Amino acid sequence: MLRKPKKRWTPSNWASWKPFGIGEQYPNNYWEVFRAIWLSRDRLPYAWNILNQGVCDGCALGTTGMQDWTLDGIHLCNVRLRLLRMNTMPAFNPQLLEDVEHLHKQKSSQLRDLGRLPYPMIRRRGEKGFRQVSWDEALNIIASRIRATTPERLSFYITSRGTVNETYYATQKAVRAMGTNNIDNAARICHSPSTAGLKAALGVGATTCSYQDWIGTDLLVFIGSNVANNQPVTVKYLHYAKKAGTKIVVINTYREPGMERYWVPSIPESALFGTKFAEDFFLVSMSGDIAFLNGTIKHMIANGWIDESFIHRHTTGFAELKARLETQSWEELEQLSGSKREEMYAFAKIVGQAQKAVFVWSMGITQHECGEDNVRAIINLALTKGFVGREGCGLMPIRGHSGVQGGAEMGCYATVFPGGKPITPENAAELSQQWGFEVPASKGLIAPEMIDAAYNRQLDVLFSVGGNFLEVLPEPDYVETALERVPLRVHIDIVLSSQMLVEPSDTVVLLPATTRYEIPGGVTETSTERRVIYSPEIPGARIGEARPEWQVFMEIARRVVETRYAASLYFENTAAIRQEIAQIVPQYAGIQHLQSAGDQFQYGGSHLCFGWKFPTPDAKAHFAVLSPPQIELPASCFLVATRRGKQFNSMVQERKDAITGAMREAVLMNASDAAKLGLKNGDAVILKNELGEYRGQVYIAPIQPGNLQIHWPEGNVLLDKSKRSREGVPDYNAVVRLEKVSDDA
């Protein structure tokens, strides 16, 4: 039984005795409310209905209306408020795109603010801009180009921002009907290492617990995750977790201010005096997580802090892991982690004393060349105490996109079919029988490989549904060249993006999409905690000729494939899609019954692997034998990681991060490192490596010595496109030299 939060106020948890944190650096969430009202003042009733009835299109908490299934009360965060205008803004005048030269100088935020894309548009090589065309003309051009090439020269990428299960499912079905598995989504470059690691270790590919397990568990650990910035509603959970006696610990390269304390605006006590969250921060170097966690496990073994009964009865591979750890000296683990043996002991003691614990991680763990091993290291630690499959325990790769959890589960993935089934001849044959057309049996191109293929002139058609390759992937100049070499690019989106303006090799087609709230019949999304939630259509004025993406792909596929397959490529509405999902994806049985606001179910129940029943071939959980990555840091060089500021994924919203106080050009740096180099706050510096250079300004911060952090996507110029994890996630970290810019430069 989890402990309940204390109802009385708890001054011991207060961040400050100053009312409303006067003088402290933190977001003004009340101002965000007024800002959202002002921006959507032309459609306030519609905006209210979105907030009051729709499922949030921000992160993957799955807030429905302004309620959720974790805590009572109103839940509304600045991430959702910042995204609201994209759902209420009017269309731009298509004449704006007749000559795009003036648009090249605009930032992505300025392009978004121009308004919604209202009509299909086309641009040929040599033309100054786009002209409006009919849907029929646009679809005929696309279908004819697809028919004229071969399936391996097609690629389709789907973003996860606001994308829904019905779109994912229908799109991947249409693409496979056209003969290719070259389809991928944003899950590839964020949590694919988590899915792979959990599947290999536990036999499941998703979060094993629920958000309710945070509140009242003994220990809540965040590793490479900054939920205060990326999933702001969770700070409410953290407030009540503290009131229930939960100990919160953070392992990170930077002492994130938002994870240390926050003023939660919807809770009077916290709004007045703030809430202290993390009681302990353990700072590690970039890519030092495995070494730190291996050292933690060494201490736990040495002190008898492990659950030997659980390990013996329900796991395998522990003896091999123990043997490997014995070969790793403390000197090596200290050097590779950037931490001290005593710090690892302190964390091991905290874990050892806990009877229940939840581990939460995000991009700070997965977006490394060793991302899969980072995840397995966390799982190893959890398995030493059996922290899975029971109340107050679990492993949670927390999601930052509202649609990302369902993407791979719907099969919108180059490496799996719907339901997460691997792409094999046997599974392809089964799907072929169910769908009535031949399904390709070989794996497709993952997102970074699509760009490589484009660069090498191996693609004839590239679809991008939302997203922006120019801002997401390393080496943006390389990406731009790759896009310039694709004969037909098709961009389906609700607003303009910089990648649409890249010069055509031959033809670029823009297709206007609806938002999730405009799709007839309503839609569903899957949250981080595996909750499948129905979001109804919100009545209101519609934008030009915008269409739901799923209808577009079905129509294209029908124009491409032979007539006899057409019946398999038709859905009357989204309810029909949900009906088929329930038949093809076993864990989603029940989705066909969702039809009203608030309808939902949590597939797998509140806890996967409940009762320590693991769906692996041997019915046991698997430890992984891991060695820390060896990173050589030349003299006078720094490890640099990219981070988020005031932004939603790659969508930058403000120059200043209200939580840290850092501007976009900030280079977060340890005070001792700055002193050694004679640097102070605000000094101009250049970060350089063999790939590029980044100009910024020193920002003294509580960060691990020898490490720097800069904002993403601006820092992509320093990243190596060839460095990827086994699942294909780019490594969003680098080694750089730092030079001070002279006053006369």
Image (cartoon, rainbow, N blue to C red):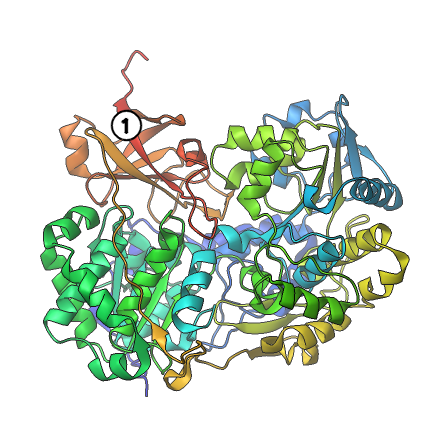
Q: Say whether residue 384 is left or right of residue 51.
A: left
Query: Toward the viewer: 317 or 346?
Result: 317
Q: Which residue is mark 1?
A: 737
Q: Residue at x 44, y 38 (%)?
A: 722
- Farthest front residue in view: 425
560 shown above or below 266: above
Q: Nearer the viewer, residue 464 or 42?
A: 464
Q: Is residue 194 visible?
A: yes
Q: Is residue 255 above or below residue 479?
A: below
Which residue is drawn at the image coordinates 68% and 63% (left, top)?
169
The quarter of the displayed image where residue 406 is located = bottom right
Q: Amino acid at mark 1?
A: Arg
Q: Secondary structure at mark 1?
A: strand
Q: Count residues near mark 1 (Cα–Cα under 10 Å), then give few for <14, some for 14-19, many for 20+.
A: some
User: Could you say where residue 142 lies in the image, as x and y percent from the top left?
Assistant: 80, 42
- In the picture, the quarter occupied by the N terminus is bottom left
Q: Position of residue 684 (x, y in %)?
A: 30, 24
- Where 685 falls versus 577 (above or below)? above
Please tell me which residue is depicted at 28% across the width and 62% down the height of the picture.
625
- Residue 564 lies, in percent from the top left, at 89, 61
394 vs 237, nearest the viewer = 394
Inspect this view and state whether residue 56 appears.
no
Residue 127 lies left or right of residue 327; in this view the side is right
